[in-house]
Image (cartoon, rainbow, N blue to C red):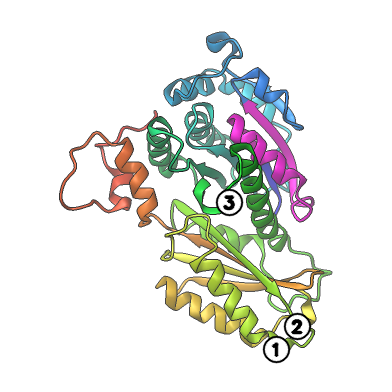
Amino acid sequence: MKVALIGVGQAGGKLAEALSRDPLAADSVVSSLAINSARADLSSIGLDTLLVGAERVNGHGVGGDNDLGATVMRDDTNEVIDAVSGRVGSDCEAIIITAGLGGGTGSGGAPVLAHELKRVYDVPVYVLGVLPGHDEGALYQRNAGRSLKTLAREADATILVDNDAWRQVGESMDEGYAAVNEKIAQRVGLLLAAGEFDPANVAAESVVDSSEIINTLREGSLAAIGYASAESSPDADANLNTITSVVRNALLTGTSLPDATTAESGLLIVAGRADRINRKGVEAARTWLEDELGSMQVRGGDYPLDSERLAALVLLGGVERSARVQAFLDRASEASVTEETPDATESLMSDDLDDLF
């Protein structure tokens, strides 16, 4: 699946850089750009860059203020669209904005950018958004809630990654962020590569193309991605249980939004050596996934990969019912706490929580 990649804010820029360098994503990322209001943060990014908000913040960033982050992006819309122009060619099938949703420039600027890009381009505009961890402070939690509500309206879909999902005990903050970025890049890289249809690739028995990714993400405004892998046997028959096991682990323990185990739609990709992928195992795993998600809209396929391991990637569309999402919306909302917890889907549409614009 051919995509143009735009990183917004410090976290978004670093994530865009990691994804653009991922080996599996190499043929899928047709262009990449990092946008920030802090000049110093841009200097460390190995991509083409664009500074926004120079007149308002003089290159010093927005200090975690996502209202200001939205304002500087809106003020410089023409410059941003000019910078993106030429990066979204006729072969581009989607635009992916990467952003940390807890900071100022990313959480405020990403929804504005999604809105403007959808006005200009006739391809889906997705956001790959990183949620702040529990230890990152109340300001970041509130920023994420407001950004989520606005993105639900402005982006075609937002794939969420919880910073707490893949961080390891004992890692420094910088080490943790770098490790999370690598894991995100690995998963999204596999998704994009699997969606890159190659007529010459006759090894895949059930090919996944970009339309299946787009249709899966069309079913809901928020999405998540799961992944797991295990050593494979040279005997495909012996891998039947391996495939069902890695698919279960991908959903139950390996998702980017840990409590997102129900969804409106799903896409399953099993990757590994073609002669080691057990087709009955893939179909059995897809059927299990349908039952587990409570959705009849579960697509599936395989992706030949030269590896001793078998991997399962699960893309979930429509995860608004996630309790983790609800927690961010609750932190951002000024509405009184009631005994009955509101449904997250309703909160995304509620007037109690202000949009960024």
Mark 1 residue type: Ala
| Three-letter amino acid code at the position of disc 3 | Gln
Residue where numbered disc 1 is placed = 238
User: Seen in the image, is 21 located left or right of residue 128?
Assistant: right
As shown in the figure, which amino acid type bears the numbered disc 2?
Answer: Ser
Q: Residue furthest right?
A: 200
The quarter in which the N terminus is drawn is bottom right
> Relative to residue 154, is residue 245 drawn left or right?
right
Q: Residue at x 56, y 80 (%)?
A: 285
Tell which circle, 1 or 2, labels the residue nearer the N-terminal end. 2
Above/below status of 156 relative to 246? above
Q: Is residue 204 above or below residue 227?
A: below
State which tag comes first along the sequence, 3 or 2.
Answer: 3
270 vs 139, nearest the viewer: 139
Q: Secondary structure at mark 3?
A: loop
Of residue 175 and residue 110, the one placed in the foreground of this image is 175
Q: Nearer the viewer, mark 3 or mark 2?
A: 3
Mark 2 burial class by Cα count in 10 Å: few <14, some 14-19, many 20+: some
Look at mark 2 in the image and give the residue it sits on.
233
Q: Which residues are magenta?
A: 6-35
* Residue 284, position as x, y percentages in the image: 56, 84
Residue placed under numbered mark 3 in the picture? 168
Q: Is residue 184 left or right of residue 218?
A: right
